[in-house]
Amino acid sequence: MNRTLRIAVAGTVALGTLYALLVAILWVPEIQVNLPQQVALNLEQSGIAHPITAVLLNFRSYDTLLEIAVLLVAVVTGLALRERDALTASTEQARDPMLHALTRRLLPLLLITSVYILWSGSYAPGGAFQAGALVAAAGVIARLAGYDIASRADVLLRLGLALGFILFLTVAVSAMLGGRPFLNYPEGWAGSLIFLIEAVLTFSIGLTLISLFVHAPGDSSPRGGADDD
Amino acid sequence: MTPILLIIPLAFAILTLLLPRHWVRAIIIPGLVLQVGAAVLLCMEIYQHGPQDYALGDWQAPLGISLIADGFSVTLLALTALIAALCAIYAQYFLTRYPREQRYFWPLFWFLLAALNGIWLAGDLFNLYVGLELLGLSAVGMVALTAEKTTLKAALDYLYAALFGSLAYLAGVALLYGAYGTLSIAQLSDMAAANPTTQVALALMTVGLLLKTAIFPLHYWLPPAHGGALAPVSALLSALVVKASFYILALLWLDVGALAVTVTAAQAMGALGAGAIFWGSWQAFQTRQIKMLVAYSTVAQLGYLMLLFPLAIGVSEAAAQLAWQGTILHLLAHAFAKAAMFLAVGTLVLALGHGRINDFGGVSQRNPVALFAFGLSAVSLMGLPPSGGFNAKWLLLQSAIASGQWHWFVVMIIGGLLTAAYVFRVFRVSFLQSAKHEIQDTHPALQLSALALALMAIALGFVSELPLSLMNLTDIAPATMGGTP
């Protein structure tokens, strides 16, 4: 297909989709179920003061559990495809005084902000995913400045990556040992357990993103690294 | 009981990721036994006590998410556990030649199982999206494992297709949530009416799922991905993974959106299926590589699944029920047969050291068990009696006659002949020609696990009643059949 024809086809499809979406939104039927209201009614029972965190970690925690598994699958695949030897951070950069000074001031700031975002998740927008992204940003900056982080794909790294998921799954399963349904929190403990899970998840999510950065294959095609068991 | 089916694979995914190599080898078999045992127990429980609705975290839908275990989902759970178990036994011996891939194969394998089980049990449209994501990513990871240039390209195409499919599906979910305020499948199937919003949402989701199921003409990513992956991975992908998105498609058309779909649209879906049957078979007939032949055969066989829509929508209750039963049997029979075929072909390629069909001479003498497994699975794919494939096609043909849709009858007959044509290519070479070069011996476990799967495809022809009677225990019966079929 030549270029003009391709653009014409893509344009037609895009316009058609836009038209369909407009029709769908303009003629939307009157809503019959009010979920936000149900969330508000059950918020007190959920142990969390913010509706979004309550939905993510309590009402629909099953979705979140599987999302964490998705992240883990992504990083496992990344590790499987990594370079044989991860590039060790260049010491050249570490000697750059500007970079060094900047990193030393930025890192604590990023980590403190991350803890704040994690903490605020229980009463305001925030939580493990956002805090984890900040941890990852700190890790990437440290890595660029020459600190050696997560460069060995050994069992310790894999444990760190999986730690959040392990804790989440353990809490979820332990409910069944007490005769309650899967993913249920014990009465009165929901708030603190959710915070604990989120704290560990922050660490694991941050480490996941850092590992994807560190172990991403370079320009040459990946050959897959040897394992350090 | 229900969530055990999710906990086992998730726990083993973590264990196989963290434990040292010799431990990983040691726990695979116990894990498989647990998984199959749990699936069988759940089947028996559903058979005795009827469908179950499990509210996760004790939050009732629509606020929370529920797992629905009915006749259909437990049958698929049992199928998944069985096929995965045999593929895993095969993989244990097959992967001894791939020491590096082994480390990451097993976590991805168990995550894939968890995703499949999650999709069969899901009672919530958004949760199905999360399940699809987990399934797609672990499948892509398994395809990419060998990290060769060709498989990486195939994996990347697969990834883009899977991501685009997920996005289109998600857009549809968002529209439905905006229109009805709930994500629970049970509630939506009561509420969803024939209005533009529902129809646009269904159209978006359908396009996404067709892409994920690799239905003609959106099948371009499947042959390189399924044909290029390691043999046990190909078997899992062709037998189970593409069925998951088809399952969601059937759920949307026959249950959630039953009032919004039209007969014309259903006929169009059937036309896609016919296109898949002809194009896939023709490509399978043309290709030089044996694994590509099996992969194109998957494209063709997926076409039969699409015939469910024209055969079950806008027809009499009896015809619709026949179509439904035929499709379910076809899904099961194809899963067994295609897994067997990929494993058998993987063994043959291992023995010969290449996959060129024209140089397959002599395998009938040196590798008779693997070739026999290939032959048995071909019997089921062609729809010859006695086999699960025969019963499935028989029911589908009867349904086409009952609703007077002769054009689909003709499509299925021609499809069967085309299947025979491409399968006999392999036999002609392997029996008529003698070996041109050395053929290595392979581990008997490789041949026997393929044979076991092929025998199951044949045995399904004798015990078709069993899955069909389990199917009757369903809440989510297609609305076209007026409640419980």
Image (cartoon, rainbow, N blue to C red):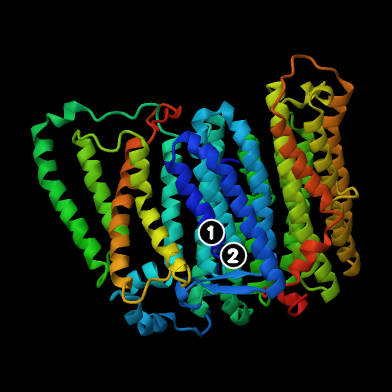
Type of the residue with mark 2: Leu
| Image disc number at residue B440 | none
Residue depicted at x 60% and y 43%: B29
Up-down relation of residue B418 to residue A93 (above or below): below
Check whether the beta carbons of the residues at disc 1 and disc 2 lie within 8 A of each other.
Answer: yes
Residue depicted at x 46% and y 46%: B15
**Rendered image quadrant of residue B97:** top right
Type of the residue with mark 1: Leu
Q: Nearer the viewer, mark 1 or mark 2?
A: 1
Q: Secondary structure at mark 1?
A: helix
Report, in whole angstroms, how far the alpha carbon at label 1 lies from the one at label 2.
9 Å
Q: Which residue is mark 1?
A: B6
Image location of residue B414, percent across then percent down: 88, 48
**Residue B245 showing in the rendered view:** no
Is B408 left, or right, of B81 in this rendering?
A: right
- In front here: A40 or B315? A40
Image location of residue A123, percent across then percent down: 25, 73
Q: Chain of mark 1?
A: B
